[in-house]
Image (cartoon, rainbow, N blue to C red):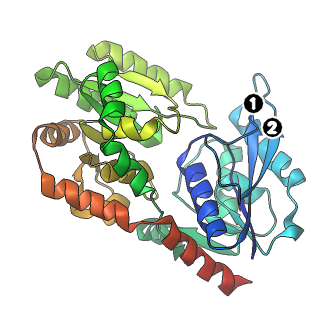
Amino acid sequence: MRIALLSYSTKPRGGVVHTLALAEALAEAGQDVTVWTLGRGGDAAFFRPVDPRVRLSIVPLPGRDGEGVGPRILRSIAVLRDAFTPGEYDIVHAQDCISANAVERCVRTVHHLDTFTTPELAACHERAIVRPYAHVCVSAAVAEEVERGWGIRPTVIPNGVDADRFARAAADTAAIARWRDRLGRYVLAVGGIEPRKGTLDLLEAYARLRDTDPELRLVIAGGETLFDYRDYRERFDKRAAELGADPVVLGPVPHDELPALVAGAGAFAFPSTKEGFGLAAMEALAAGVPLVTRELPVLREVFGDVARFSSTPEGFAAELRAALTGDDPERRAAGRALAARYTWRAAADAHLRLYRSLV
C-alpha cells in the first residue's frame, strides 16, 4: 500500500514523534511510506535519523521576519498544498490541522482539541475536523469529544511508545550521572513553556516544594512550537522572579540525550490542560520515573492507577512531594509494564486495518 503521512514540522513535537514512529512501523510491516512535512527556517532533516525504508519529502518554508501566526498558518498550508502530489498514494493521512488543510482528501488523526482565538487558526482547526473522510484519535476520551462536538465517530488507535529506549536509559548510570552532576536533584517537565502544558501551575507547585526542599530543581525541556507564546513566557518569567524560583529551561534536548535526562528525574510532572494521550509521560513511566499529572478524563483513561493526579498547584506540590519521597516499587513496575504494552507495531497493525477498510 502506498501511504503518505503528513506533518507540519521537523522539530520534536509529540505529533511529529508520532508521525515518524508510525511511518517506521508501517515500513517495517512492508508498506510503501512517505512522510511529507515543512522544513522551517532552513531545516532539511528531521530532529533524528529516520529508517531509510521511509521516504522523506521535506518542503522548504523560509522564515519571514515579522510574520504573524495567522499569515504563517496560511502560508504553511499553501506551500505544502502546492508541493504535495496526492495521486501517488492509496492513503493520505494528515496528523495535524495544517497538513489536513493542505490536501483535498485525507484521513486525519485528531491528537487533541484546542480552542483558538486567532481567526486563521480557528478556521484551520474546524476544517481539519469536518473535511477529512475518516478520523483517528489516540484515546477514547478525545474520540468522545469529537463525537459530542461534531457527530463524527473516530477510530481509536492508541499511541505507540519506544519503551525499550527509555528502559535502557534507566540502566545507563553514566549518562544519568552526567545529568545529575549538571542539574542536581530535579523534577522534569517536557514540552516547553506554554498554556496547554500548564507550566504556570507547575511553577506555583515548585515554589511550594522548595519551601521544604530548597535543593530541588525544576527542569523544563522541549518547547519547539509553531505558535507564539511570548506573552505566556513573560508571565512565567515574571512569576518565577516574584516567587524567587529559578527553573532550568533547557529548550530542545538532543534526541540521544533525552532518555537519560528523563531517567535521571526524581519525578516527572505533566500538568497539561489538554492532551490526546501523553506520550512524554508514558516514556517517563518506561524509564521507571514516578508520574504526577493533571486530573483529566484522557489521562485517567491512559494512566489509571500508575500515576498521581491533581488539578491545583497545591495538589501538584503534595503529589510531587509524595512521589519524590515515597519508594513505591509496585507503582513503578506497573508503570513500566503499562508503557511496554503500547507498541508501534500494534499501532501500525491497527492503522493498516483501517486503511484497508477505506481503499
Q: In the shown orientation, is residue 187 left or right of residue 48?
A: left
Q: Secondary structure at mark 1?
A: loop
Q: In the shown orientation, is residue 259 left or right of residue 33?
A: left
Q: Quadrant of residue 228?
A: top right
Taking the spot 33% from the left edge, 56% from the top edge, the residue there is: 296
The mark nearer the N terminus, 2 or 1, is 1
Q: Is residue 226 above or below residue 5?
A: above
Residue type at mark 2: give it. Answer: Leu
Residue type at mark 1: give it. Answer: Gly
Q: In the shown orientation, is residue 292 left or right of residue 117?
A: left
Q: Residues within 10 Å of mark 2 (few under 14, many from 20)?
A: some
Q: Is residue 148 above or below residue 240?
A: below
Q: Which mark is residue 61?
A: 2
Position in image of residue 266 (x %, y %): 23, 36
Q: Is residue 24 above or below residue 114?
A: below
Taking the spot 71% from the left edge, 45% from the top edge, the residue there is: 120
Q: Secondary structure at mark 2?
A: strand
Which part of the image, by quadrant, shows the C terminus?
bottom right
Position in image of residue 262 (x %, y %): 36, 39
Check contact, mark 2 vs mark 1: CB within 8 A.
yes
Q: Which mark is residue 41?
A: 1
Marker count (numbered): 2
Q: Is residue 105 above or below residue 256?
A: below
